[in-house]
Image (cartoon, helix red, strand yellow):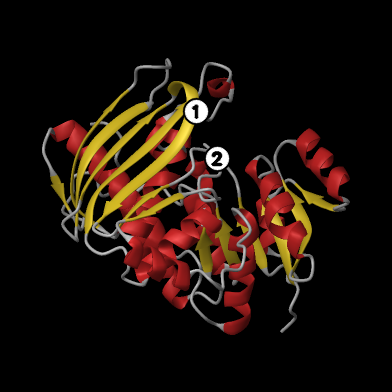
């Protein structure tokens, strides 16, 4: 088995970032061999920029390429489910941007397909990677943080008419949701990554900033499985953009940086309760090796997993957890009741979370 995996990028919006941040820094592990996009101008621009000669507009052509190991799906969300299922059926490894699919029913179908597929599927949650969040993760996993008390998650970004002028954005059929799906899903994944699973959620969504179908504001109160309480707020109407995660534990306060699009990187606040805890944290982090941000680390870890047969850095189960939160959010907002977890086929929103 060759160490260098050949990649086909499908969709060259965020797909270009996958090339720049994820694949080019690891040219000893990946070769971007094929580009696929319906927009011929963009297809040729990205192909020329990176010297990638093989360019197609038909996804079925990529499926038939026996030398392609990985299909990286970066298309609008509404197309993800069909493309994932086709790529797995063709025996390819798959990388797919968030949101993975448009319902819990779809993600459960993907999980079932994965069990018999030759290839592996890695969803994208690149905000997990960077020194800040990974130091916090090490402290929590080591048990030094102690009992979790409360957490807050704030995704306060700005998006206006120019952003929603792109035809597929702001529509249930193609974007699958609003701020919960496309923007705050990252910080919410970071919240559960560090604080653990959710036990219950009471949430509200609203469309207050833009003239669109989907929500652009959201807030929720969460009960975590470990007993901690958490709050979430998200908006696309904040003139100062921040992504902020703040976690209060028995022995340490952890707060992310406020960089909207790279909250995983340092500096993070890590404030110990006393000198004894500070010494334990210092000892834990003495051998720290810098962790590249975002796609750089996630793609490197993906390659390592493919070569070793070990666990993927991000799994379909992680994507399901993120979509479970989204499902509960929409159900709670519509019914004005708390939704308990896990969320399964009994939920009225299991097959679709679009408004009734």
Residue 156, horizontal then vertical, whole percent:
42, 29
In the rendered image, residue 61, in percent from the top left (x then y), is placed at: 72, 57
Q: Residues within 10 Å of mark 2 (few under 14, many from 20)?
A: some
Q: Residue at x 59, y 83 (%)?
A: 308
Tell me if 44 is positioned left or right of 305 in this view: right
Q: Secondary structure at mark 2?
A: loop
The answer to whether mark 2 and mark 1 are in CB contact below 8 A is no
Q: Which label is found at residue 142?
A: none
Which image quadrant: the C terminus?
top left
Question: Which picture quadrant has residue 5?
Answer: bottom right
Q: Earlier in the sequence, mark 2 or mark 1?
A: 1
The residue that disc 1 covers is 241
Q: Position of residue 258 (x, y in %)?
A: 48, 38
Q: Residues within 10 Å of mark 1 (few under 14, many from 20)?
A: some
Find the distance from the CA under tag 2 to the CA under tag 1.
9 Å
Residue under the image location 46 percent in, 52 percent down? 100
Residue depicted at x 49% and y 61% = 134
Indicate the position of residue 167 as horizontal and vertical percent values.
56, 25
Q: Residue at x 61, y 68 (%)?
A: 289
Quarter of the image with the N terminus in it: bottom right
Q: Work out whether residue 168 or residue 304 is closer to the camera in this orientation and state it.
A: 304
When the figure is inspected, residue 104 is found, relative to residue 158, above or below; the finding is below
The front one of 153 and 257 is 257
Residue 299 in sight from this viewpoint: yes
Above or below 303: residue 295 = above
Tell me, for residue 261, which label it has, or none.
Answer: 2
């Amino acid at each position: 088995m060759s160490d260098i995996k050949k990649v086909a990028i499908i969709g060259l919006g965020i797909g270009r970032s996958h090339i720049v941040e994820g694949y080019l820094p690891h040219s000893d592990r990946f070769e971007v061999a094929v580009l696929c996009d319906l927009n011929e101008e963009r297809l040729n621009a990205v192909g020329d920029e990176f010297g990638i000669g093989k360019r197609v507009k038909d996804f079925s052509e990529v499926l038939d390429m026996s030398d392609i190991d990985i299909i990286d799906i970066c298309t609008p969300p509404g197309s993800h489910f069909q493309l994932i299922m086709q790529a797995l059926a063709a025996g390819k490894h798959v990388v797919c941007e968030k949101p993975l699919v448009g319902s819990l029913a779809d993600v459960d179908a993907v999980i079932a397909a994965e069990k018999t597929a030759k290839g592996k599927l890695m969803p994208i949650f690149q905000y997990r990677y960077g020194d800040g969040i990974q130091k916090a993760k090490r402290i929590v996993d080591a048990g030094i943080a102690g009992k979790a008390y409360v957490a807050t998650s704030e995704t306060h970004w700005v998006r206006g008419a120019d952003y929603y002028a792109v035809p597929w954005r702001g529509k249930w059929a193609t974007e699958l949701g609003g701020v919960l799906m496309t923007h705050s899903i990252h910080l919410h994944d970071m919240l559960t990554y560090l604080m653990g699973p959710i036990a219950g959620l009471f949430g509200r969504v609203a469309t207050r900033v833009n003239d669109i179908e989907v929500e652009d504001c959201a807030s929720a109160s969460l009960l975590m499985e470990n007993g901690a309480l958490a709050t979430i707020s998200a908006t696309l109407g904040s003139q100062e953009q921040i992504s902020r995660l703040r976690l209060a534990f028995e022995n340490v306060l952890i707060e992310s940086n406020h960089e909207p699009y790279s909250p995983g990187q340092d500096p993070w606040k890590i404030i110990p309760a006393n000198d004894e805890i500070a010494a334990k944290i210092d000892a834990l982090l003495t051998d720290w090796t810098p962790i590249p941000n975002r796609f750089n680390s996630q793609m490197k870890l993906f390659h390592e997993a493919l070569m070793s047969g070990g666990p993927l850095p991000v799994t379909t189960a992680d994507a399901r957890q993120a979509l479970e939160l989204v499902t509960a959010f929409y159900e709670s907002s519509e019914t004005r009741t708390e939704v308990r977890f896990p969320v399964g086929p009994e939920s009225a929103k299991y097959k679709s979370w679009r408004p009734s």
